[in-house]
Image (tube, rainbow, N blue to C red):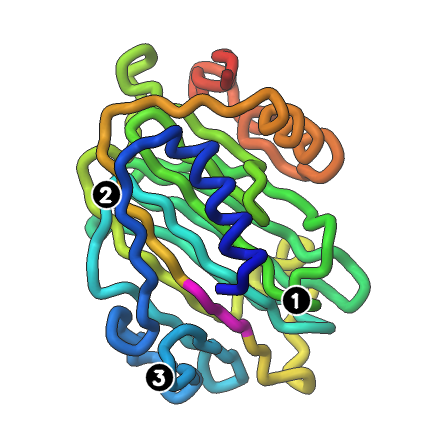
Amino acid sequence: MSSSSSLRAAAALLFICNCLVAVSIATDLVKDVDIDEWGKEHVKVSEDGASLSLSLDKDSGSGFQTKEEYLFSRFDVELKLSPGYSAGVVTTFYLSSLGTKHDEIDFEFLGNVTGEPITLHTNIYSQGEGLKEKTYNLWYDPSEEYHLYSVVWNLERIVFMVDDKPIRVHNNHEKDLNLPYPTKQPMRVYASIWNGDDWATKGGSVKINWQYAPYVAHYRNLNITEYEQGEDHPLTQEDKDYIEMVEEEHMIYNYCDAYEKEIVPECDVPIY
């Protein structure tokens, strides 16, 4: 990671960890991950194990997953998306356990036609239950340079971050509302690029154009910081203001507006 990225990560760790004991692990993308068999020939890894590219063409997409599982950690990766026309292309960075009652925390980047914003789709599953989608039009071009994407997952809340700034918070409502929350199932880190043109861009009305293939996503500096459980780490007022700005200016879908309140009772509870 560059010195500037390291400083940003350190600053964000202070805001999230609040002096919590943590162990940070720099993941070797050669030794510490398994490449998915379905697109193995579409993966290129740097010799030092710090960076990896996944590609999609008409034959196949590609992906990888960590060998280890983690519980209550911070997950950081720097990612640069495929440039230009990318309608129908789905690029992901997410956490997941296994089974029908699985837990999952998603970053999904949905491609678009040239000149239109890439969409960031976030979602959370707990014990197999989802319906927690929030979606944003990105306010920058994620293909021009690497950006840092982070998931902070602790016993109290899940925080989605872009370039060390929180954009979404999802709180644990197991005790007050009896709602499922990921607390018991360790998860692996997954990343992939694949053809989602049946839904990804304008509801599936805009398809992949294979003349622009291969579509290539670049990942680097995957770091995992394992936490001790049991502490709450509230956000600063500046963090809350930033989340509010992102929601007001860039959010295009909020599950709280799509369902009756009895289905999503947490939406009536203040986040902070």
Q: From the viewer's perspective, is the residue at label 2 or at label 3 nearer?
A: 2
Choose between 161 and 38: the one closer to the eye: 161
Name the outermost residue toward the right: 115
Give the magenta-colored segment's residue range. 217-221
Labels 1 and 3: the sequence-earlier one: 3
Query: Is residue 92 among what the camera can see?
Result: yes
Q: Give the number of the disc on residue 71.
A: 2
Q: Residue flagged by tag 2: what amino acid is it?
A: Leu
Residue that label 1 marks: 145
Q: Do the residues labelled 1 and 2 touch (CB within 8 Å)?
A: no
**In the picture shown, does residue 159 fall above or below 3?**
above
Q: Residue at x 50, y 79 (%)?
A: 55
Residue 28 falls within the magenta-colored stretch: no
Q: Is mark 2 on a helix, strand or loop?
A: loop
**In the picture shown, does residue 53 fall above or below 204?**
below
**In the picture shown, does residue 22 fall above or below 243?**
below
Residue that label 3 marks: 40
Labels 2 and 3: the sequence-earlier one: 3
Choose between 8 and 260: the one closer to the eye: 8
